[in-house]
Image (tube, helix red, strand yellow):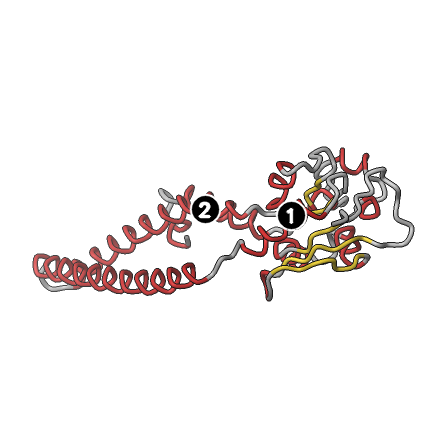
Amino acid sequence: MPVTLASRRLRPVGIALVVLILVGLRPGYLPAPYVVALLPFCAVSFAAGAEVVGRRALTAARTHLPSARTGQAFTIRAGAALVLVTLVMGSLLIAEHWSVQRRRNDAWDANRATLAAERWMSNHVNHEARVLVDDTYFVDLVHDGFDPDLGVVWFYKLDFSTNLDPSVIRALPNGYRDFDYVVSSPIIRAALAGNPGRLRDVRRALQSSKPVVSFGNGANRVVIRRIVAPGRATSGRRGHQRVG
């Protein structure tokens, strides 16, 4: 990126990359696929930067070596050797990373706790309940019979400071007190850790709830919690745990 910024011809690519990085560093919600937008500019910056550096190295070699022909031949051989070494080292690093990741993926089911929590909620929680979840659960819970109209709410919409969805604020003026359950998932916990001072109603929902059941362990643990805060509003959706 510094090379592209220093080159007038390549500066637009460098500026685009800088802007994308700065937007990604700002506080607040950032969708994980955002990194896809960075990849083309990173690839162009890398290739263009290599071209600029290589061309300048070739020019310097021709200038300082006693024979331009000898210098050019030397530079070509040195450049070919450097490219070969880079390709070999890169291939070894990629192969090692791929091998470790493949073994990890074969032995670890990252979605096990999430799927178990979804099945439990579908079977044990009244579908008239109002639940606060991350976006992983929304479609499945709606498919299982929960009401998509404020029956299942994406937790970022409860961040009144961003006014992400004004309809939620109008319909749920009591915030977390209008909910029956909150799902403490890795996504919600990471969002709270990454946004200090924000998502206050989500924090209060977790603090004002009691664990009902949990799935998984460690960082992937999913806990279904029932909100028991004093002064809870009566939403008319009071979803209690099913019997049996």
Q: Nearer the viewer, mark 2 or mark 1?
A: 1
Find residue 152 and report its image quarter: top right
- Indicate whether 20 appears above or below 145: below
The furthest residue to the front? 244
Alpha carbon distance from label 2 to label 1: 25 Å
Q: Which x, y percent locates residue 148?
A: 69, 34
- The amino acid type, in three-letter code, at marker 1 is Asp
From the image, tell me which residue sits under label 1.
134
Q: Residues within 10 Å of mark 1 (few under 14, many from 20)?
A: many
Residue 195 location (% of width, % of height): 68, 55
Residue assigned mark 2: 38
Report the residue at 54% width, 55% height from top. 112
Choose the circle earlier in sequence order: 2 or 1: 2
**Residue visible at 41% across and 43% down?**
13
Q: Within the image, what quadrant is residue 76 found in? A: bottom left
Where residue 66 sits in the image (x, y, percent)?
A: 11, 64
For label 1, the SS is loop
Q: Residues within 10 Å of mark 2 (few under 14, many from 20)?
A: some
- Judged left or right of residue 143, residue 49 is left
Give the SS element for disc 2: helix
**Image position of 229 (left or right of 222):** right
Name the residue: 81% across, 39% down: 237
Q: Nearer the viewer, residue 101 or 27?
A: 101
* Mark 2 in CB contact with mark 1 (< 8 angstroms): no
Residue nearest the observer in this picture, 229 or 46: 229
Inspect the image, locate mark 2, and give the three-letter code of the amino acid beneath it.
Answer: Leu
Q: Is residue 163 above or below residue 241?
A: above
* Displayed quadrant of residue 99: bottom left
Q: Nearer the viewer, residue 30 or 122?
A: 122
